Amino acid sequence: MIRSILRWVLAWFYAIAGYFHLASPEGFLAIMPGWVPAPEAVVFWTGIAEIAGAIGLLQPWSRPLRQAAGAGLALYALCVWPANMHHFAMDLARASSGEPGGLGLAYHVPRMMAQPVIIWLALWVGEVTGWPLARHK
């Protein structure tokens, strides 16, 4: 029951994030590390990946497709971690220079701590793993 509820929560989170990647890419482009090639295309395709992953998690017909979606979203969360770290560093630099703006430590520290949890959650709700909640037989 809890896995199903969290699957819906995670899928909605990714679907909404995917929508914003497509509808308002400016914020995502602003935090993109400079070494990423074709940032507009990356933001567009990550939005598509988020929406496709959300659909894959929620579809009821195929467990292998749900597992692929969970694995894909976990990999996605791992791959965007550098952009999150870059955003954190940009905001810290902005704050230390006295520039206005930025989201501060109260946003970035929990976000960094949540990233491994989101990776695990995608794998768990996608039924890729049962760890550590699997019952021992």
Image: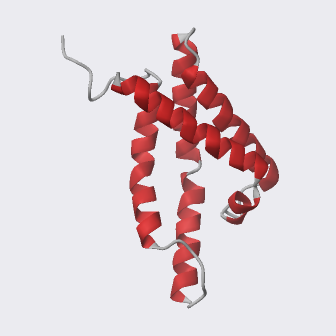
**In the depicted structure, whether residue 13 falls above or below residue 102:** above
Q: Report x, y in % for residue 41.
A: 81, 47
**In the depicted structure, whether residue 16 falls above or below residue 97:** above
Q: In the image shown, does 65 or 33 lie closer to the viewer?
A: 65
Q: Quadrant of the N terminus?
A: top left
Q: Residue at x 33, y 23 (%)?
A: 130
Q: Quadrant of the C terminus?
A: top left
Dividing the picture into quadrants, the one containing residue 101 is bottom right
Tell me if I can see residue 42 in this picture: no
Tell me if I can see residue 18 in this picture: yes
Q: Residue at x 77, y 49 (%)?
A: 23
Q: Residue at x 76, y 61 (%)?
A: 26
Number of residue marks: 0
Q: Report x, y in % for residue 27.
A: 70, 62
Taking the view exactly as shown, the residue that stands out farthest to the left is: 137
91 on left or right of 40: left
